[in-house]
Amino acid sequence: MDKINQGMRWQKMVAGSLCGLVLLILPSVIFKSQYFLYLSSLACIYMIVSCGLNITMGYAGQISLAQAGFLGIGAYTGALLGSTLGFWVTLPLGGLIAFVIGLGLGFPSLRVKTHFLAMVTIGFTVIVYLVLMNEQQWTGGPYGIFNIKKPSIGPFAFTSPAAYHIVVAVVTFILLFFAFWALNSPWGRAFKAIRENEGRAEMLGVSIRNYKLMAFAIGAGYAGVAGGLIGPLFGYIDPTMFALGFSFLFLLMVVVGGLGRFEGALLGAIIVAILPETLRFAEQYYPIIFALAAVLIMIFMPKGSVSFVDWVYKKLTGKEELQLTK
């Protein structure tokens, strides 16, 4: 019976993974507008960042405002080394560098909690921004780096918006699949135990230090990979793209979507990526409308916008909520 249930779980996982991959790639097939393809690619990149932050914050309970800094590290790694090492090497390299720096930042962060931890990560993001802004001989300073090329495989180059969206979608799928697997493994249960009660988790044999470091580093690595994707999407990067304000934007994605819910972070990334663009018609008033919309979501859906998905799911199936992770 256990083997049958395990086989059914694997079948559902494979089917769900294929559906997810199709949904991520679908915009490159149905959208002809470069603008909509750009939004779809940006939403995928935001999903990667918010998914990593959700592991750090939503599951392990660590407040981090360092995502913009790690995003910048990945972006500048790809921009500076891409012409010599190539996109396919610098993309995971940027994620690895961010992962290692995340481990280093995580050690002192273990000694502080809540808003003190937030201050440490804010300081890190500000330091990264200042380095990118002032080390002009390497980073281009306030002018940034231009003419960042899109990737290629042999003679085929992913230069068109649709082709590059496929690259972004496949990378997004791989990282989301790993996160989904990890959160449904003993890792995920350990993260949740630490978030709920550190003392009780330690009594059960969970290594608080190791799991906190791993959660923080995974979030950093995800942001680093996302940075490697954002450079070719825009064609240029500059330090203002990785200022502290963007860390708050990524935090907003996780909170608006649903903190501690795998699907919530993805939904929040889509909302934050698309909503500001749909409000461009309001001109100078669109930031106010966007902020008001975020506040209303938090007032009427305190568990995040994923609670609306839960409500629809309950009406259709009679079950309490759509929970993708254990």
Image (cartoon, grey):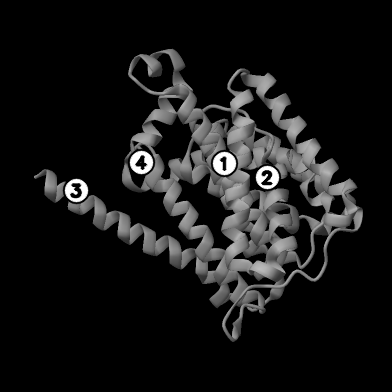
Residue where numbered disc 1 is placed: 219
**Mark on residue 146?**
none
Label 2 or label 1, whichever comes before in sequence order? 2
Given residues 245 and 277, the one toward you in this image is 245
Look at the image and tell me whether residue 232 can be seen. yes
- Look at label 1 and name its amino acid: Gly
The answer to whether mark 2 and mark 1 are in CB contact below 8 A is yes
Residue where numbered disc 4 is placed: 184
Label 2 or label 3, whichever comes before in sequence order? 3
Image side of residue 69 versus residue 187, left or right: right
Residue 299 rendering spot, x and y as whole percentages? 63, 30
- Look at label 2 and name its amino acid: Phe
Question: Callout 4 environment at 10 Å: few (<14), some (14 to 19), or many (20+)?
Answer: some
Image side of residue 284 versus residue 192, left or right: right
Given residues 205 and 321, the one toward you in this image is 205
Label 4 or label 1, whichever comes before in sequence order? 4
**Mark on residue 70?**
2
- The answer for how far apart the CA atoms under marks 2 and 3 are is 38 Å
State the residue at coordinates (16%, 47%): 5
- The answer for how far apart the CA atoms under marks 2 and 4 are is 26 Å
Residue where numbered disc 3 is placed: 6
Q: Nearer the viewer, mark 2 or mark 4?
A: 2
